[in-house]
């Protein structure tokens, strides 16, 4: 009976594994597409707006905090700031390289930064929703936290041999982190609830698409196909290409007629008769 893989061999397997297992690619792609659609709908709904919608008002009143709760919310909301984001990104990149190899490092360096750029330089000025004097949709702080959290979740959930219970625990932990930061931003009146929802949509759409793209590129690099340099130019095309098949009975008839014609033209062989 083969022994279970442990130690360095197990680590190597995890480093070489795909970020998204093949049997989950369709579901991950569908989730990324759904997140993009939800973000687009919210962007269209609140484009050029400066006030809160009904949903925003109701959730904002529900999450309003005072005293100690507001102080805690301030600390949590600051997690998505530039300095904490940069520190977490560097740490996550190092961990991704150690645990998931080149695929993991590429995901961390491509996915979260792309989501942050999409929010800050594309969607915010394009949508033009404001809260006070600041562009609000989607939330930049929420995008930073959500994109890093989604990337970390992809790294962990793609590990070979992870049990279903542990996968559920990782997903719940990731959701709790993103929800805590979103609630803090809303409670501190920095953003409307729909701003944070749009940020989560951007993070899911961009980071999951990046994971699928990294896997596709890595698979091509790992197996580029036959090397054209292995082809021998001295070989005739008929030696390497399959011959076309003629209808049944036709090749033999033609071969027989050609043989008869050749024998008739050549005459009797010397010494025969």
Image: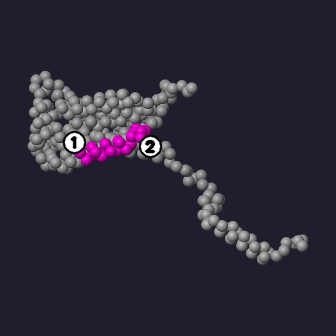
Residue bounds of the magenta highlight: 18-38
Looking at the image, can residue 176 be seen? Answer: yes
Badge 2 local density, few (<14 within 10 Å), some, or many (20+)? some
| Quadrant containing the C terminus in the rendered view | bottom right
Name the residue rendered at 32%, 28% in the picture: 169
Q: Residue at x 12, y 32 (%)?
A: 62
Residue at (13%, 49%) from the top-left corner?
A: 48
Considering every residue shown, the one lying at the far front of the view is: 249
167 in relation to 264, above or below: above
Which of the labelled discs sits on residue 198, or is there none? 1
Residue 71 — which label? none
Task: Give the SS element for disc 2.
Answer: helix
Residue 214 rendering spot, x and y as whole percentages: 40, 43
Secondary structure character of the magenta stretch overall: helix
Q: Quadrant of the N terminus?
A: top right
Q: Percent from the top left, x then y, of residue 128?
A: 16, 48
Q: Secondary structure at mark 1?
A: helix
Residue that appears at 18% across and 43% down: 137
* Label 1, residues with CA under 10 Å away: few <14, some 14-19, many ≥20: many
92 horizontally vs 202: left or right: right
Q: Determine the image quadrant of residue 201.
A: top left
Q: Nearer the viewer, mark 2 or mark 1?
A: 1
Q: Position of residue 103 (x, y in %)?
A: 41, 38
Residue denoted by label 2: 218
Return the disc, 2 or 1, that comes first in the chain's sequence.
1
Examine the image and state in which quarter residue 167 appears.
top left
């Amino acid at each position: 009976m083969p022994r279970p893989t442990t130690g360095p061999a197990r680590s190597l397997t995890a480093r070489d594994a795909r970020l998204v297992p093949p049997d989950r690619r369709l579901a991950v792609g569908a989730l990324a597409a759904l997140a993009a659609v939800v973000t687009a709908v919210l962007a269209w709904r609140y484009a050029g707006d400066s006030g809160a919608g009904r949903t925003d008002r109701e959730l904002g009143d529900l999450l309003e905090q005072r005293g100690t709760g507001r102080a805690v919310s301030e600390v949590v909301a600051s997690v998505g700031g530039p300095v904490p984001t940069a520190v977490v990104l560097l740490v996550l990149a190092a961990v991704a390289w150690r645990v998931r190899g080149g695929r993991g490092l590429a995901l961390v360096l491509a996915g979260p930064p792309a989501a942050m750029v999409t929010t800050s330089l594309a969607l915010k000025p394009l949508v033009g929703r404001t809260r006070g004097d600041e562009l609000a949709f989607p939330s930049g702080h929420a995008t930073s936290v959500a994109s890093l959290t989604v990337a970390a979740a992809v790294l962990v959930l793609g590990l070979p041999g992870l049990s279903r219970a542990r996968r559920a625990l990782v997903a719940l932990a990731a959701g709790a982190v993103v929800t805590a930061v979103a609630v803090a931003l809303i409670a501190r009146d920095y953003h409307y609830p729909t701003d944070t929802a749009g940020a989560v949509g951007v993070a899911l759409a961009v980071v999951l698409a990046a994971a699928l793209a990294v896997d596709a590129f890595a698979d091509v690099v790992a197996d580029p196909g036959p090397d054209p340099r292995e082809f021998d130019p001295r070989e005739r095309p008929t030696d390497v290409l399959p011959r076309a098949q003629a209808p049944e009975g036709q090749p033999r008839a033609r071969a027989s007629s050609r043989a008869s014609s050749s024998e008739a033209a050549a005459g009797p062989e010397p010494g025969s008769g």
